[in-house]
Amino acid sequence: MVEIPAQKNFTGGIYGNADFNSTCITTAFATNFLLGNYIGDNLKQEVSSNFNKFNRIGYSLNYGAYGVWHNDSVQTRVFNFFFALRHKSYINTDFSRNVFNMAFYGNAMYAGQTAKLVPFSLNMLNYQQAEIGMVVTNFGGKGVFGIGVSFLAGQQFLSINAQNASLYTDPTGQNLQFSTNTEMYQTDTAGNRKPLNGYGASMDLYFKAPLKIGKRNSTISLSLTDIGFMFWNNKSLYYHKDTSYYYDGVSINNITDLQNVSFNSTSKDSLQNKYIPYAKKSFFSSIPSTLSINSTTDFGKYHLELGYWYIFNANAVGYYYIQGDKYIANKWMAAAQLGFGGYGTVNAELMLSKQTEKSTFRVALNHIQGLILPTYFGGAGLYLEYLHTIGK
């Protein structure tokens, strides 16, 4: 939901936000992995020391433009209208210690054992959003109510959910036994670069009201954003398998048999049809939706904010935070936030804002702990926003 400015004229803005956070993957590990650098044992051990029963990774990339204009007053109420164009990308996963070990150490450490590979859940989504909406001031007294409706254009979607998965490795390495009960939905891999593989709709709701905390002026706000769905076309892929696989290698009696074990495109298709059969069909999916509740108390040049948010359908947990804002000279404002939850554990954020007569610029660094101590914590985030008012 677009925050409505106080001015009675047109305001336009652009923004961008990139954010990565994790309960276990350190910033140093993520940086080296993305750059294609060698992942040594020290980097792996730094990650392993952070493992819990549930381990999370979350990444998002959001950017867009919006406009807000004041229309007219009806009695004591003021109606404001807005539009927004956005791009949104999400990748998030919930996985076990064994999944990481299997991926970066191999299965030798599990010789003679059965490695449980659950929990495991992976979501990836890429779409665009066009929204129009209205915000009414003096709603039900001195409250503010807003509603927005969006059309969604989907590009890419992948969802993998393993209810059960395990791998048994023979003590001598002679055979493997893999058991799984996994469901997967994916957009057509040949069409991921197309501008439209799916479409949908969503809704935003926003309410803010004043209140008193002691003798201090305060506000409390509640918002529900991106309540919606996406419909993906009939070229999308669906996979569900609840079975066990036994593999004991390929028998080679002499060197001439090697020509029979090459994996060309035909043999790959045969293996996929045998072990990972999929069906092409259309399907619906929910998009990540956010519930946010916060209160702000006015202390003159200072503001204190307490808040909570939770993202549905995104492998995240609830995030609790406390934030202090201070207005300083020449219309500068600084803010610091401490929080816990989301895709990570502890979080520290710093924000700086500069306001001129008709413009405002904001920049924020998120997950400061992952930037200062990259071998102990995970996370890095940057938010930029610029808005400008046209008219008197």
Image: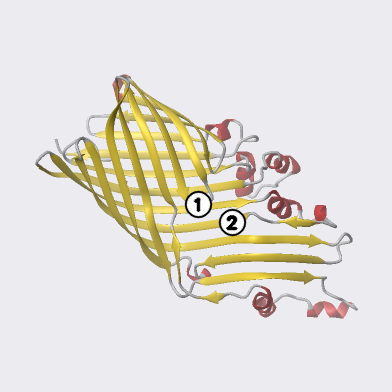
Residue sitting at the far left: 75
For label 1, the residue is 314
Q: Tell me the number on the disc at residue 121.
A: 2
Establish if 291 lies above or below 231: above
Q: Front-most of 258 and 298?
A: 298
Which residue is drawn at the image coordinates 62% and 75% (left, top)? 277
Query: Considering the numbered disc 2 on the image, is that residue within a helix, a strand or a loop?
Result: strand
Q: How far from the left and from the top, in percent, is residue 23?
A: 60, 41
**Quadrant including the C terminus:** top left
Which image quadrant for residue 215? Answer: top left
Establish if 160 lies above or below 144: below
Crowd class of label 2 (few under 14; some 14 to 19; many from 20; radius 10 Å): many
* Residue type beneath disc 2: Ser
Which image quadrant for residue 120? Answer: bottom right
Q: How far from the left and from the top, in percent, is residue 214?
A: 32, 21
Which residue is drawn at the image coordinates 86% and 80% (left, top)? 256
Q: How far from the left and from the top, in percent, is residue 380?
A: 53, 39
Which residue is drawn at the image coordinates 25% and 46% (left, top)? 67
Q: Is residue 353 left or right of residue 381?
A: left
Q: How is the image coloured?
A: secondary structure
Which residue is drawn at the image coordinates 66% and 69% (left, top)? 242
Query: Considering the numbered disc 1 on the image, is that residue within a helix, a strand or a loop?
Result: loop
Crowd class of label 1 (few under 14; some 14 to 19; many from 20; radius 10 Å): many
Q: How far from the left and from the top, in percent, is residue 296?
A: 35, 29
Disc 1 from disc 2: Cα separation: 9 Å
Counting residues from the start of the chain, the first of labels 1 and 2 encountered is 2
